[in-house]
Amino acid sequence: MDARFKQELSSPTPVSRSRSLVREIGQRIAADIAAGRLLPGARLPTEQEHMAELGVSRTVIREAVAMLRAEGLIATRQGIGSFVAELPTRALFRIEPGQSETLSDSLDIMELRTAVETEAAGLAAERATRGQRRAIRLALLAIDTAIERGEAAIGEDFALHAAITDATGNPQFRRFLEFLGRFIIPRASVRIRALNLRAYLITFQQEHRAIVAAIDARSVDQARAAMRQHLMMSRQRYRTLAPGR
């Protein structure tokens, strides 16, 4: 292995063994790419070199490289080896499936959402067509129906926020929401034990109504304020489940 590359590895110590070992190795290599320690076109160590350096099996190395190849970060040349892609096809920013399993992670994601969705609500109030406003109202009613059935309304909650982003007229807002996927609804990954679920859902549904009313009224400032209030209150409610945050 190139001595210069050996020195540039982000962490030469063996990684800990866990169920997420493949992801951990993949993240380590991706971090080296993101930090510029591995430049476009640079050759990755061989499987044997990676095994010795990281203290993991050949299978783990192969799966980690395959994961990065699927993401467009690595290209494999038959009979030569694996290289950092010249033009990575996937942005390096990502939220891994196991990255929002804690309340702390969920709160961080909700803070990110606040910045994006507050503006989306204002744009929806300004730009929504009659059909889009109707779709938002129907999504709100779908949450009511799910609550009445005793459900957590996770899919319906996502659909409402997606309908609002659709009404911005800017498809990037919807793509951002889809990128986050289930992570935008923390109760999809965090169990609410201390709270009465139905009472909790009714509370945040009142906040949803304020958002929808402002969009219907084409009040840009009120829509932004209502969305910001909703997401800030949501963070506050979840924070009660994470002492010390």
Image (tube, rainbow, N blue to C red):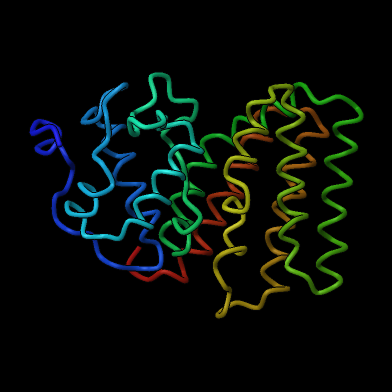
**Above/below status of 32 relative to 129:** below
Q: Is residue 122 left or right of residue 160?
A: left
Q: Is residue 123 left or right of residue 112?
A: right
Quadrant hosting residue 194: bottom right
Compare residues 234 and 14 and report the one nearer the observer: 14
Compare residues 9 and 227 and report the one nearer the observer: 9
Tell me what residue is drawn at x 41 percent, y 69 percent.
242
Q: Position of residue 123 (x, y in %)?
A: 68, 25
Q: Position of residue 230 (x, y in %)?
A: 61, 50
Q: Is residue 7 left or right of residue 145?
A: left
Q: Quadrant of the C terminus?
A: bottom left
Q: Is residue 184 left or right of residue 167?
A: left
Q: Quadrant of the N terminus?
A: top left
Tell me what residue is drawn at x 57 percent, y 44 percent.
180
- Numbered circles on residues, count: 0
**Above/below status of 117 relative to 187:** above
Quadrant hosting residue 148: bottom right
Tell me what residue is drawn at x 31 percent, y 32 percent.
34
Q: Position of residue 244 (x, y in %)?
A: 32, 67
Tell me what residue is drawn at x 17 percent, y 51 percent.
53
**Above/below status of 171 relative to 15:** above
**Above/below status of 228 relative to 78:** below
Compare residues 53 and 79 and report the one nearer the observer: 79
Compare residues 118 and 183 and report the one nearer the observer: 183
Quadrant hosting residue 74: top left
